[in-house]
Image (cartoon, rainbow, N blue to C red):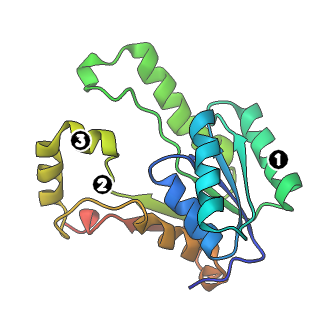
Amino acid sequence: MFDLSQKVALVAGGAGYLGLPVCRGLAEQGAAVMVADVNRAGLDKAAARVRAALPRARVDACFLDVASEDSCRQAVAQTASGLGGLHILVNLTTQSAGRRVEDIAEAEFDRALHANVYGALALARAAADAMAPGPFPNPAVQASDPAFIERLAGQVPLGRIGRPEECAGAVAFLASDDASYITGQTLAVNGGWTAW
């Protein structure tokens, strides 16, 4: 599909629901991939899964807490030194309390706001293209509220929620030389959610 064999990618949130398929998709296209996540146990498992699926892939893992600028700098430095540079930065991190708004304490909200907004700034201080995922509820949400998932799918023009692997191709495209004249754009991967 796309040749990323001369590229190195850092995927923040790489052990997550969307992150793991993106890591695998970038590795399938030849990129060296740093799986970065705050979830240490999930981080090692995610990197191992990509390596198991793609034995020749260059895959490494590092801890990354996007709420900490020091952690962001360390992850970037580890990627550059361990894999030979940094050409692709993917931020798939998100933090939420996982509860209804009225049940969230102010301190929890502040932590999520800081991680979700400041984390993006700390990772990307330059203009970049972006992939904006639409309705991709994680498995816990899908299992806990099937009625919500059905209502959500009914609001999407394609009539379903997204599958995490559907983000991988969009990220690989934006990271490839085929997108070399695309800059400052957001590719909506959302089943037509924003087309209404």
Q: Are marks 3 and 2 in contact (CB under 8 Å)?
A: no
Please tell me whether mark 1 sits on a helix, a strand or a loop. Answer: helix
- Residue 160 rendering spot, x and y as whole percentages: 20, 63
- Residue 80 rendering spot, x and y as whole percentages: 84, 55
Nearer the camera: disc 2 or disc 1: 1
Mark 3 neighbour density, 10 Å: few (under 14) some (14–19) many (20 or more): few
Residue where numbered disc 2 is placed? 135
Residue where numbered disc 3 is placed? 143
Quarter residue 33 falls in: bottom right
Residue type at mark 3: give it: Ala
Give above or below for 5 relative to 171: below
Residue type at mark 2: give it: Pro
Q: CA gap, disc 2 to disc 1?
A: 32 Å
Mark 1 neighbour density, 10 Å: few (under 14) some (14–19) many (20 or more): many
Please give the name of the residue rendered at 49% of the width and 71% of the height, measured from the top-left corner.
Answer: 170
Q: Are marks 2 and 1 in contact (CB under 8 Å)?
A: no
Task: Return the residue nearer the eye: 101 or 31.
Answer: 31
Nearer the camera: disc 3 or disc 1: 3
